[in-house]
Amino acid sequence: MKLGLCVLIVANVASADLPADFRLPEPPGAFVKKTSPELAQRVSFRSGEPVIATTYFYWYDITTKAHVIDPDGTDALTDHPPTLEGFTYKNVDWHVQQLRDMIDAGIDVVLPVYWGTPIEHDSWSNAGLPKLVAARQKLLDEGRKPPAIGLFYDTSTLRHNSRHYHVDLRTAAGRLWFYGTIRDFFSLIPPAHRAMIDGKPLVFLYSASFAQGVDEQLFPAARTLFQREFGTDLFLVKMPGWPGKAEAEYRWGGALRPQFLDVAAFGPGYDHSAVPGRKPLVRDREQGRYYSRAWETLLSRPPQTRPWLVHLETWNEFHEGTDICTSREYGRQYIELTRRYADLFHARRQFR
């Protein structure tokens, strides 16, 4: 996962501990309120029912060239969108097209990769979410069924943020920071647009390694605070390395090698050629065969025993070439492949 430009700035700056008296600012959005049980159930998926989610990178902005052109003026993208016109998180129509294509691909949940923190409410991470919500509402008004919105918590912000804090999740202040990041995201997502499983908002957690430390008190503390303000528990999907009980476990890196834990995680291939400072690393797409094999490995398992939750890595991480969205390089090939296998997965069919 390509770190944002802010990381390049702060990487060489000594980190500080989060102040012990840290308090959460007001949330950036208006939707911190209890969700009625009736609404939660109406917009929910149920655990055990086939669900396909994909990580959504919305940090691109052609108007400022952020995540489009690197600081040295070179192309920041390995793969490319069909056009750069309107290619920005600020553009509702860009989000609309992505959601339309996700519908075509048979995807149930979009997971915006959230780089927000409780101290940075004016960031692109927050500014882009109302645009995504507006796009989803537009499709609902057209009678379509766009993917619901879950959270992919990019925990690299525990190490890389504007105050150079290295957050220790073993402390009361650190636990508040962790909860505050989740709170801020969902404060911008109205309840009717949230992806919920068994009535609980869906949260994928990136690596625990970015924290200064973490212990088993973290998840219960975050659940308690979320329950107090939102009226529901969380459906946590963690990577190995996080202590404490979560509802499911997945592993990042499925684009390089398919992962089958509680969650099946895979992607179409990998190539981070455009990312400065990295050694070459390519997982060839094999003209779609690599992606097809991953799907067929999952679908060859009996429906009763295979993972019911799939994480596709990724919808549109153009820096690392893991995109399944429409691209200049591959057209709609991976949307069409995804739909073919998604239909079998949703129908609980077994591939033979």
Image (tube, rainbow, N blue to C red):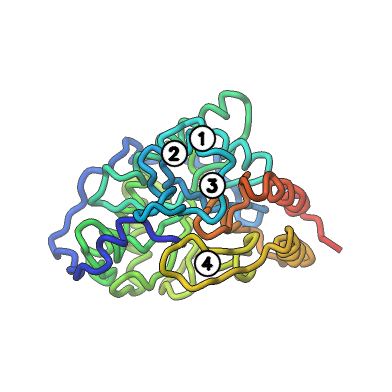
Secondary structure found at label 4: loop
Residues tagged 2 and 1 counted as in contact (Cβ below 8 A): yes
Q: What type is the residue that disc 3 sits on?
A: Val
Task: Give me the C-alpha separation between circle 1 and circle 3.
Answer: 14 Å
Q: Nearer the viewer, mark 4 or mark 1?
A: 1
Q: Identify the amino acid type marked 2.
A: Thr
Horizontal relation, residue 342 to residue 319: left or right: right
Q: Quadrant of residue 254?
A: bottom right
Q: Is residue 297 visible?
A: yes
Instruction: Give SS at disc 2.
Output: loop
Q: Which residue is mark 3?
A: 110
Residue 29: image location, x then y, percent: 32, 38
Position of 215 compared to 150: left or right? left
Looking at the image, the residue that sits furthest to the top is 142
94 or 129, which lies in front? Answer: 94
Q: Earlier in the sequence, mark 4 or mark 1?
A: 1
Residue 245, by quadrant, is bottom left
Q: Residue at x 34, y 54 (%)?
A: 71
Q: Amino acid at mark 1?
A: Trp
The residue under label 4 is which amino acid type? Trp
Residue 88: numbered disc: 2
The label number, if any, that marks residue 94 in the structure image: 1
Image depth: mark 1 or mark 3 in front:
1
Q: Residues within 10 Å of mark 2 (few under 14, many from 20)?
A: many
- At a point 48% along the width and 33% down the height, the residue shown is 86
The residue that appears at 62% across and 34% down in the rendered structure is 145
Tell me which numbered mark, 4 or 2, is placed earlier along the sequence.
2
